Amino acid sequence: MKKEDFYKIRRQLGKTQKQMAQLLGTSLKAVQSFEQGWRKIPVHIERQMLFLLAHSGPPGRKESRCWNIRKCPVEKKRQCPAWEFQLGRLCWFINGTICGGEPQESWEKKMKRCRKCRVFQSMLPTP
């Protein structure tokens, strides 16, 4: 996650740096360092930020499931943890999802692919 993304997501959530630090279980100094680019944003912080963002929309909003958007064949859906746990709009959050026909191994590799996907992009703040 880039420092600009961290900042935009915090603003989208309507949180101060102090409030964000409390939500993430980290220090105010850490949040400031993430936003200034002085410190790399750890994977667990990125995941938590994105999880909060995914759940921050208006109640009752209707979103498509990833397998519908990507038109996944039934045999691929049955192998995918996102399908198994019915997390079609949180597919990016679940490791081992079957995107592009193969399981995604690491968070870094997965997020490289997910950042290009409409499902993931639909929850991001607009530039």
Image (cartoon, grey):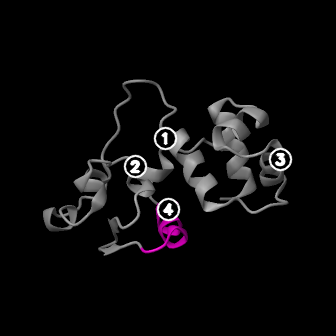
Give the label on residue 116, or none.
4
Instruction: Please give the residue where the numbered disc 1 appears in the rendered image.
Output: 54
**Mark 2 / mark 1, whichever is N-terminal:** 1
CB within 8 Å, label 2 to label 1: yes
- Counting labels gives 4
Horizontal side, residue 119 vs residue 125: left or right: left
Q: Determine if residue 67 is in view.
A: no
- Residue neighbourhood size for the residue with mark 3, other residues' Cα within 10 Å, grouped as few (<14), some (14–19), many (≥20): some
Secondary structure at numbered mark 4: loop
Q: Amino acid type of disc 4? A: Lys
Disc 2 versus disc 4: distance between alpha carbons? 15 Å
Q: CA distance from mark 3 to mark 2?
A: 27 Å
**Is residue 82 or residue 113 the one in the foreground?**
82
Q: Residue tagged by mark 3? A: 32
Mark 1 nearby-residue class (10 Å; few <14, some 14–19, many ≥20): some
Q: Which residues are magenta?
A: 105-116
Residue 70 at x, y = what percent? 30, 58
The amino acid on which the numbered mark 3 sits, given as a three-letter code, is Gln
Q: Residue at x 30, y 47 (%)?
A: 65
Which of labels 2 and 4 is toward the front?
A: 2
How busy is the neighbourhood of tag 2: few (under 14 within 10 Å), some, or many (20 plus)? some
Give amino acid for label 1: Ala
Identify the main secondary structure in magenta: helix
Of labels 4 and 1, earlier in sequence is: 1
Vertically, is 30 above or below 22? below
